[in-house]
Every structure is written in C-alpha cells, then in structure tokens.
Image (cartoon, rainbow, N blue to C red):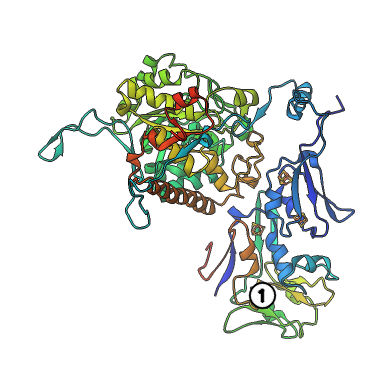
C-alpha cells in the first residue's frame, strides 16, 4: 500500500506538514486562518515532527500490516480497511480509553485536543482521494507518498 | 561600550489578522528575528536581527509577513547617506574591516542596459526557432590557425575543447563557500543541460566525481584539494588568479566552516582557516604563469584545456594578451559585479571594471594582435538574463559564467550575508541544519530549468536577428547599438550609437 515516508536528510524542520494536517482535519479544511483563529479548540495535527536538530523528520501512523492498535482497541473503533490497508479510527465508536496510544510502537496516536475524548491519528487524508496534505505542502520534498518500501 | 548606535535595517510586519502563531517563521529564521513568547503564546519579532532574506515570508502559510526597509530616516544629507553613517557606527564599535557577501550593489552604470539588439526586417528574413534548427553548441579552447585536410581528415589534431550545449556555465563556487547540496544541485543541472560547473578553489568532494565530464576543476593560490585524481577528474582546469568581487585579494574561509568533510576535501586540518594568498606565490609574471599552465597541461597529458580566470581591472586588455601568449586555452574574466561568499565591502564596491567594457577591450585587443583564435573568452560578473548573454556574445564572448543568477535559481534572495554562514536558504552555509533546507533534487531541477529557459530565449533573440547559429553572432558587434553612452564609451565598446 501507499505510505508516507520521511526523508530525514531534507526535512527543514519547518513543521508546515503539521500546520496543514491540522487544517485538513479541522472544522475549516479549506480556510487555514479560520481553522486556527475561529475554531474554538486549536486544531491538532496528526503528523508530528520529531526533532533533535539537525535531525528532524515527520512521523505519522505507519498503517502497520499487523497493526497492534486494531488488536488492542476495546470497542472495535480502530480498524484496518481490508481493501486500502489504511488504519482508521471510527470516532463514533471510539470510547477514549487510550489503549491504542499505549500500544502504538511509533507514538502515532494522540488524544484529540477537541475534548471529544477520541483517539486521533493519520488517515492518509483518505477522504480527499489524493496526495496527503503533509506531502503536498512540504516545501522541500522531504515527504514522499509511495507504495515502494523506503529505507528498508 | 553598552550603547550601540546601530539601528535596524529592516522592519518585520506581521499581519495579526492572518498570523496563526504556527511558529514556522520562528523555526526558519537562523538569525532568530522571530521569537516565540511563551507567556503571551504568540510570535513576536526583533527587527534589528532581520537581514531581509525572505525565508519566513516565503514559508509563512498564511502570508502574514512583509519585510520593509526600516522607516527611520536620518536628517536628509546628499553627502552622508544612511549607509555611510551606519558603516561608521559599525566600525566605531568593531574596529574591524566591513565584510559582506555577493556582488557590488552600488549604482554604477550597467552597460548591458545601454546596448540594444538588432532584428531583421524585409531585407533579410528572421527565423522561427520553433520551426527551424538553431545551433547554440559552443566549443571552448584554442582553435588552430588554419585547418589542413588530407584524405578528408584533419592533418593536425584539434587542441582539446570543452563542449557546451549552451554558451553558459556555472561559475566557480567552492565547497566551503557554498554547501554541498548547492554544489550537487549545480553539478546535476550541468549534467542535465550539457554545460559545466566549476569547483572553485575548494577541491572536489568525493560525491561529485561522478559529474566529472561536466566539471571544471580550479587551481587557486591556496592549492586546496589539488592532487592527481582531482586534475584528472574534470573536463578542464582553471587557474584562478582573481575574482571580480575582490580583485587582488585571496579567498578566506573561516575555520568554523571547515568541518570534517570540507577539511578532507580541501586537505587541511579541521577547524583551521583556509586562507588563499592574494597572489600565487609561484606566479609573479606572465612567464611564471606560463610555467603553471604547462605544468598542468603536462600533468594531464595535454588532454584538457587549461584556462585562467582573472578579475576585470585597468589594463585588462594587455593582461589578457599576456595570458593568451602564456598558453592559456580559455580566459575567464570576472567583472566588478561578480559575487562572492565573503569580501571586504570597500574592495567589493570600489575595485575593478564593468565586464562589458573589459570584454570589448579584450576581444578588440586579441583581434588586433591576431591571436583571438588562440583563446576562448568566457565572461562573468552579473549576467542577469538571456539578453545579457546575447549581448555578451555579440561583444565577443565565447560563453558566459553565471554564479549569482544560478544561486538565485536555488532560492538565494541576495541578502548579502553569505559571509555570516547563516544562509537561511541552505546555500552559503555549512550548518547541517540549514544545508538540509536545500534538497539538491529540487535545486537541480530549478537550475536546469533556468538554463533551458534561457536557451529558448537566446534562440528566440537569434532568430529575430535572422541568425541560426550562435557562432555567427560571436563578436558581431554590428548587431549592437549603444544608447545613452558617450563617444568614448561607444568607442571602447566598439559599437555604433542607436540610430546610426
Ligand atoms: S513540512 Fe516537510 S520539511 Fe517541513 S517539517 Fe514537515 S517534513 Fe519537514
Ligand atoms: S496507529 Fe500505530 S500501531 Fe496503529 S497502524 Fe498506525 S503506527 Fe501502527
Ligand atoms: S509563519 Fe506566519 S502564520 Fe506562522 S507564526 Fe509566523 S507569521 Fe504567524
Ligand atoms: S532574517 Fe530572513 S527569515 Fe529572519 S525575519 Fe528576516 S527575512 Fe525573515
């Protein structure tokens, strides 16, 4: 399946990926200013830039083949789509027990800052059908979206 | 001294209606002009630290930023400009010489802008480059006095030539003065477009050997990184005598920029200053230069053209004639607007000659002496666009070097702070955190695009003149007319006045 891979050597540490991810998953996906200034709770990104300069790279859910979060999920909210391979949290079923957060080996699941008490994670922008917004907006091509296995 | 008299040069304007406090600007400004205020949970700025590189402006996702000239004005004084006063404050505080980067920014005349090109009307047809073939291929190197053929073959071997698809090359910029990612961008772009890049005096990094056939290796007064494989690696060798931004002064790379890789490439200890002597201490005359030229030819079995690069200075024509007679295959002349990674401000802004005048004077002199065929002429020093190139070729150049324009294609915003090592665009820096910002894949594409774009424009301009090969334009000053120039300037340029 297609995944987002980080090219650490070109990550400028700007965190524009985080900004645009937060906007895309906010109440105002088409208006960056409203997403940040009008929405009551600050939008949370689902990609996180890990850094210890000069090293930095963007990390999001790896959509693992054998995803621990889907096995640990107590309500069946966290599911791996058998067709696309994308691991998605069905927020209507998520009870906010944070078990997935505990088991994710990458730290890719977070609590939703919106107080929804749901787990929030990368969905590969599966609703827009195109390039994930982090990849689209990285100014230095430090993120690639490909089905080749990178870095192995 | 607690009170500094220096005031900011630029003003950072943040539109608070648009700013989302994402802190992208804070992370991108290596000068730390944007600051995150933890208590207020918002971004603020320190104008005094801004150098107007526009990295933050370009990356701000909401276009909330503008950089302006700082509005504070000194009492009007035609003699004492703000720059003149501020320079004194600075020196009164530092006691040192003023350093800067990039080329001369003073308002001297730009002769390119006083030269107009011809076009065909009625009496000879213009050519449409989209329909008809157009030749820009250029060979640099000594051309034989005459061609003798026997059985359909040349009797004498052609002297070694550099072959260019377009008469443009990336000028010398050393590893050290610019980042490895910047050099990789230019090297890959040169390979893609069939031109050359130049190592500068910093040696050849191991990752760059694969670009050998598109490389000119330089030998400068510090002889950094010069060894047999290095001389063999390139397609040509260039002896650097001087550069336009600082004629008479050698390069100086401060020890902070000499990290492990730079030290290995330059073959000097890590952390030591890399100081190139002002002259080559084995070249005090044309005869000495001849020795070095022939030593390098000997070392490479006469298989590679050897060029000599000099800065345009008074008497340039006589100097160039001497260099031609010393056996150089290519003479590169760098005008006073040529860029640099670091130069004393007063030298940069007051020493040298406009390249247009130098080129015309040298080409005329070599023709008069009947030795123009012995050398190719390459000129540089602020070629800004394809029209400048066409004018340069018509004035007598065989090809041009572009340095500043090439860096601008990679993202350089001409903030002139190359000497600080804090280039926010990852170009003139060795700081790994900043170097990462320049992805050489993107850089190579941008630089190659620039060359292709200019290639199209040169063909367009040639076609308009009814010329289908760049060779027919070379030294064809009848295609030029001067406008707004004195008789003396017209005669040095060897062109007629517009209307004549
Ligand atoms: S947008 Fe790209 S360069 Fe910026 S932090 Fe994210 S991955 Fe790194
Ligand atoms: S959330 Fe973590 S465990 Fe689940 S698929 Fe993504 S990376 Fe794997
Ligand atoms: S990058 Fe732009 S939006 Fe983000 S904090 Fe800076 S000025 Fe504000
Ligand atoms: S120095 Fe460059 S990045 Fe920093 S504030 Fe000024 S323009 Fe922006």
Residue situated furthest right in the rendering? B39
Would you identify the image quadrant in which residue B289 lies?
A: top left
Q: Between residue B103 and residue A123, name the one nearer to us.
A: B103
Quadrant location, ligand no. 3: bottom right
Q: Between residue B433 and residue A149, name the one nearer to us.
A: B433
Residue situated furthest left in the rendering? B151
Q: Between residue B469 and residue B142, name the one nearer to us.
A: B469
Q: Between residue B248 and residue B367, name the one nearer to us.
A: B367
Q: SS for tag 1?
A: loop
Q: Residue at x 38, y 34 (%)?
A: B478
Q: Residue at x 30, y 30 (%)?
A: B142
Whether residue B464 is situated above or below residue B96 in the rendered picture: below
Describe residue B89's horizontal placement relative to residue A123 as left or right: right
Describe residue B227's horizontal placement relative to residue A123 as left or right: left
Whether residue A85 is situated above or below residue A18 in the rendered picture: below
Give the quarter of the figure containing the N terminus of chain B.
Answer: top right
Name the spot of residue B362 as percent of width and height, x first. Answer: 41, 24
Counting other residues with Cα less than 10 Å from the Cα at mark 1, is it few (<14), some (14-19), or many (20 or more)?
some
Name the spot of residue B340 as percent of width and height, x first. Answer: 57, 32
Examine the rendering and report whether any part of residue B294 can be seen.
no
Name the spot of residue B238 as percent of width and height, x first. Answer: 41, 30
The residue wearing badge 1 is A123
Q: Residue at x 63, y 60 (%)?
A: A138
Tag count: 1
Chain bearing mark 1 = A
Name the spot of residue B213 as percent of width and height, x first. Answer: 37, 43
Whether residue B407 is situated above or below residue B281 in the rendered picture: below
Examine the rendering and report whether any part of residue A123 can be seen.
yes
Whether residue B299 is situated above or below residue B132 in the rendered picture: above
């Amino acid at each position: 399946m297609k995944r987002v891979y980080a090219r650490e050597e070109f990550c400028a540490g700007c965190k524009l990926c985080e900004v645009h991810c937060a906007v895309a998953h906010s109440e105002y996906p088409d208006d960056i200013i409203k997403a940040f200034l009008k929405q009551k709770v600050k939008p949370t990104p689902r990609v996180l830039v890990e850094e210890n300069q000069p090293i930095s790279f963007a990390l999001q859910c790896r959509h693992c083949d054998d995803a621990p979060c889907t096995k640990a999920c107590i309500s069946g909210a966290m599911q791996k789509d058998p067709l696309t391979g994308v691991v998605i949290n069905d927020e209507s079923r998520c009870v906010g027990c944070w078990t997935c957060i505990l088991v994710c080996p990458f730290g890719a699941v977070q609590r939703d800052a919106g107080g929804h008490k749901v787990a929030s994670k990368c969905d590969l922008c599966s609703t827009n059908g195109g390039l994930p917004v982090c990849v689209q907006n990285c100014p230095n091509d430090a993120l690639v979206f490909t089905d080749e296995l990178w870095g192995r | 001294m607690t009170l500094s008299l220096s005031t900011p040069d630029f003003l950072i304007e943040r539109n608070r209606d648009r700013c989302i406090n994402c802190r992208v600007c804070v992370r991108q400004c290596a000068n730390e002009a944007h600051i995150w205020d933890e208590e207020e949970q918002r971004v603020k700025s320190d104008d005094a630290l801004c150098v107007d590189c526009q990295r933050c402006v370009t990356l701000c996702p909401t276009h909330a930023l503008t950089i302006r000239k700082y509005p504070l004005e000194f009492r009007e004084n035609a003699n004492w400009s703000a720059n003149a006063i501020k320079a004194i404050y600075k020196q009164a505080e530092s006691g040192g010489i003023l350093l800067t980067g990039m080329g001369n920014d003073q308002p001297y005349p730009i002769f390119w802008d006083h030269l107009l090109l011809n076009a065909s009307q009625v009496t000879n047809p213009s050519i449409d480059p989209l329909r008809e073939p157009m030749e820009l291929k250029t060979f640099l190197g000594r051309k034989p006095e005459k061609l003798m053929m026997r059985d359909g073959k040349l009797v004498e071997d052609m002297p070694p030539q550099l072959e260019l698809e377009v008469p443009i090359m990336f000028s010398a910029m050393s590893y050290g003065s610019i980042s490895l990612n910047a050099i990789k961008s230019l090297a890959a772009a040169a390979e893609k477009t069939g031109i050359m890049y130049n190592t500068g005096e910093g040696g050849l990094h191991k990752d760059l050997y694969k670009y050998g056939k598109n490389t000119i290796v330089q030998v400068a007064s510090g002889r950094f990184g010069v060894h047999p494989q290095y001389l063999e690696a390139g397609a040509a060798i260039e002896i650097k005598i001087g550069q336009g931004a600082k004629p008479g002064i050698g390069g100086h790379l401060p020890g902070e920029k000499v990290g492990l890789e730079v030290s290995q490439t330059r073959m000097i200890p890590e952390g030591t200053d890399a100081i190139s002597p002002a002259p080559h201490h084995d070249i005090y005359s044309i005869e000495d230069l001849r020795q070095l030229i022939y030593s390098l030819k000997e070392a490479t079995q006469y298989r590679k053209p050897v060029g000599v690069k000099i800065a345009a200075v008074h008497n340039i024509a006589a100097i160039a004639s001497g260099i031609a007679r010393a056996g150089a295959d290519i003479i590169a002349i760098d005008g006073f607007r040529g860029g640099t990674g670091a130069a004393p401000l007063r030298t940069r802004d007051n020493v040298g000659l406009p390249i247009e005048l130098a080129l015309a004077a040298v080409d005329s002199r070599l023709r008069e002496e009947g030795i123009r065929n012995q050398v190719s002429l390459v000129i540089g020093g602020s070629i800004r666009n394809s029209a400048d190139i066409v004018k340069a070729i018509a004035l007598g150049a065989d090809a041009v070097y572009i340095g500043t324009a090439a860096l601008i294609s990679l993202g350089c915003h001409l903030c002139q702070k190359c000497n600080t090592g804090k280039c926010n665009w990852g170009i003139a820096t060795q700081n790994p955190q900043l170097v990462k910002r320049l992805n050489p894949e993107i850089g190579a594409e941008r630089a190659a695009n620039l060359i292709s774009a200019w290639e199209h424009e040169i063909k367009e301009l040639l076609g308009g003149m009814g010329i289908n090969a760049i060779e027919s334009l070379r030294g064809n000053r009848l295609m030029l007319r001067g406008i707004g120039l004195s008789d003396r300037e017209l005669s040095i340029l060897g062109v007629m006045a517009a209307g004549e």
